[in-house]
Image (tube, rainbow, N blue to C red):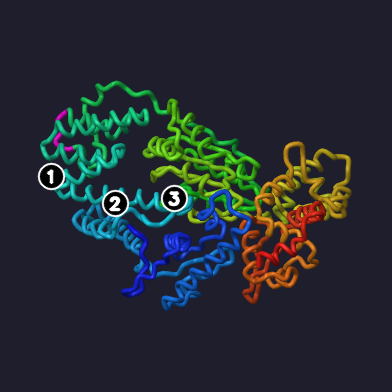
Amino acid sequence: MLGSFDVTLGTCNITPTAPRLRQILALLVVQSGRTVTLSELIDEMWGDDPPVSAQSTLQTYIYKLRKSLEASGLESSEVLRTRPNGYALQVPDDCIDLRLFDRAVAEGRRILPEAPDKALGHLKEGLELWRGPALTDVSTGEVLAAHTARLHADHLSALELKIEADLKLGNHRTVVPELTSLSTAHPLHEGFHSLLMHALHCSGRRSEALQVYNRLRRDLVEELGLEPSPLLQRAQQAILSGEPQLGAGSPLEAPAQQPRAAIAVKREPAPVRPGQLPPDPGPLVGRDSLTESAIRAAGGAESADENVGVLLLNGMPGVGKSALAARIAHAVRDRFTGGQLYVDLRGSRSRPTSPDEALTGFLRAAGIPEPYPQSLDEKSSLFRSWGAERNMLLLLDDAQTHSQVNPLLLGGTHSFTIITSRVNLYNLPNAETFEINSLDPPESFQLLAKIVGGKRAEAERDSVELIAEMCGHLPLALRCAGARLAALQGVPIRRFAESLYRGNRPLDQLQSADVSIRDRYLATYDRLGSRERAVLRLLTLLRQREFTAATLIGLLGCTEAVAESALSTLVEHHFLRTVPSPDGETVYSFHELIRAFCRERMESELSAPPARESLADAS
């Protein structure tokens, strides 16, 4: 992975020659051991404009990849395993140079403060694995490009650590040539310039160290309109005041006390501290345990996992992801002293917010003056440079794809990002995913009683429980029903429950002036392929509430691969859900309201070409 893409078995090179197969295999390897979803593979190969036949074409590529592996003597079913919603490559970590690099760097980073000599050995061992830019001969789409960008950043970080270890061992003069080359190749990289200033200063080349600072400052101002970071400014002042070293420990550490010369420098304006979070919804019914777990992941407790940088809240429309995200954000906001940024990415709308639009809003909130760079990459780099040393909290609501999210993520270790999405954005870096489900019956009753009044709800408890069941215990639907009941104070709850139960179009009852359950489903439904929409409509003809892939095959006469692919996509987009089965077979079911929605779509689309024929063709 760390250079040209090479797959070897013993002394034989078994790398696929077809560009698409190389691309798919590279994505599977970079995430080896984890499931790469069908949607992620489609995003990688076709971006935001996949063809209608994307899934069947992808299955053809997977088939060819299996044949390529089998031709090399491998058991493809053991190496490349099929999952309910994608594929997973099973390769030992010791057989992947990327994993060996990560392991060596992690160990070097861990022991650097106490044993820089041993850390230097580990870091050199990891860096020697690099043979050039990562995946230099592989065509990359948006998903794989994000991984290669991370690998590039990890490579630069490892170089910084290696040089830092050298400096801790007193090798100031020997690293100057390497640092000079790196700072020239990366003219806006503050880390390399900081290390070069340190090495030159400690080598008695004080004037050259100041020239490095002046050159970097000029480039930053001309290219990005930014001043060097406070750390670099303090380093410059330490050199001007003649301090023997720039810091007592790591060359990247600030001096324990700012020198007097720095105090005389003009004071910079107070940094902008944006506060954009939506209103705090307060405690949410049935979400206490989930909220506590998410707060721990966000660093709100001593037991927090320091490696978690992204919290993904995933679930079907109307399950309460946005409200829960706002609750979590407000619970931990005091920990993020750099401020909070929020954007509605509108992934469920007809026109999602582009990452360029979101970045423009973030840069304005940060107080960075216009004009901004034109390209998305440069604008994202400017945002990351601004947020690199800040302790920021980001809330990205209603995300749709990796390409929409990746440019908005800060690269530092001080910030935290909360993302909500109807689609599981697998394999975001340093992410922990929470699946948000519907409430249970007692919680649903509690929510309705909170809206319509406790005494009124208890007086007609059976009717309230029936309404909760018809709403599928979905928080948004329960709130719509509760609002309707609250407006009909003189009407028995039983009457509304009967109209909801006996009506042909229950979604008509679950909407208000500004909220429509039907519209929430329709936005996601319209993004499905024609095959998946046809499957949904026809599945509503089944009398049983639970079914298997074999049921779909019998109903439609399609192949097993087509059935499993369609069902996996529908589960991923939360139109279907899986339920436990004693025999281990995957069993699927509808949510109550989604079943009602799909029946509506079937009735309104009867004039469309028969779905059975299109599925047979696809198989």
Image quarter where the N terminus lies is bottom left
Q: Select label 3 or label 1 by which is in front.
A: 3
**Sequence-earlier tag: 3 or 2:** 3
Q: Nearer the viewer, mark 3 or mark 2?
A: 3
The answer to whether residue 586 is visible is: yes
Q: Gap in Å between the C-alphas at discs 3 and 1?
A: 36 Å
Residue 8 image point, x, y percent: 35, 70
Near-viewer residue (299 or 410): 410
Residue 289 visible to the viewer: no
Predominant secondary structure in magenta? loop
Judging by the rendered image, the residue that carries numbered circle 1 is 173
The amino acid type, in three-letter code, at marker 3 is: Ala
Decide: is 547 above or below 475. below
Spatial separation of the CA atoms under disc 3 and disc 2: 18 Å
* Side of 474 relative to 492 (left or right): left
Residue 573 or 389: which is nearer the viewer? 573
Provide residue 452's location: percent of width, then percent of height: 78, 43
The magenta segment is 241-245
Q: Which residue is mark 2?
A: 158
Left or right: residue 495 versus residue 98 is right
Q: Which residue is mark 3?
A: 146
Label ID, residue 516:
none
Q: Is residue 171 left or right of residue 68?
A: left
Q: Quadrant of residue 39?
A: bottom right
